[in-house]
Image (cartoon, grey):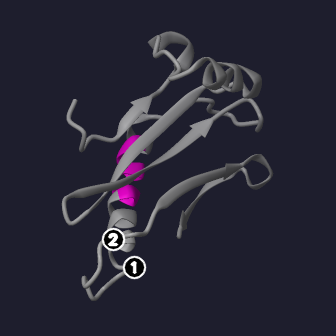
Amino acid sequence: MECLDTVLVANLATEGRPAPSARSAATASQVGLTSIIAAPLYARGVLVGVISVARSSLTNRTQPHYTPADRDLFGAVASWAGTAVDNVDPSGASPLTARATCISQPRHQGAFLAVE
């Protein structure tokens, strides 16, 4: 897998991907994470961030897992987001200082991209 790839972990219970830390594993367990998609954000060929979405048992959904079609759509959105981050400084006179952060809040049942 290249770093340009959007990553889909369709079913966390069966794919055996370890959490990056014990704290992360505990949080994933608490919220009942079931599926994750993560995509790199590139601007002018430079990695400027990563955006991700996750499904959990916090919301009642008929489909608890993301699909390859979801991954493809999310990858396209990430590509557009990388371009948007690049456009924060259209003059190109200073280094790119924007930071893209994915903020997910259960009460909104979705993920939001914030550019600072």
Residue annotated with mark 2: 96
Residue at figure coordinates x 55%, y 29% from the top left = 35
Q: Residues within 10 Å of mark 2 (few under 14, many from 20)?
A: some
Residue annotated with mark 1: 88
**2 and 1 marks in contact (CB < 8 Å):** yes
The quadrant holding residue 24 is: top right
**Circle 2: residue type:** Leu
Residue 23 appears in the figure: yes
What is the magenta segment's predominant secondary structure? Answer: helix
Q: In this rendering, is residue 7 above or below 77?
A: above
Q: Which label lies toward us, 2 or 1?
A: 2
Q: Where does residue 40 sit, x and y in percent of width and height?
A: 34, 48
10 in magenta: no
Residue at figure coordinates x 43%, y 41% from the top left = 38
Q: Where does residue 45 sit, x and y in percent of width and height?
A: 19, 59
Furthest residue to the right?
107
Q: In this rendering, is residue 111 above or below 58?
A: below
**Circle 1: residue type:** Val
Q: In this rendering, is residue 51 above or below 99?
A: above
Q: Where does residue 34 sit, x and y in percent of width and height?
A: 61, 25
The quadrant holding residue 53 is: top right
Q: Where does residue 107 sit, x and y in percent of width and height?
A: 80, 51
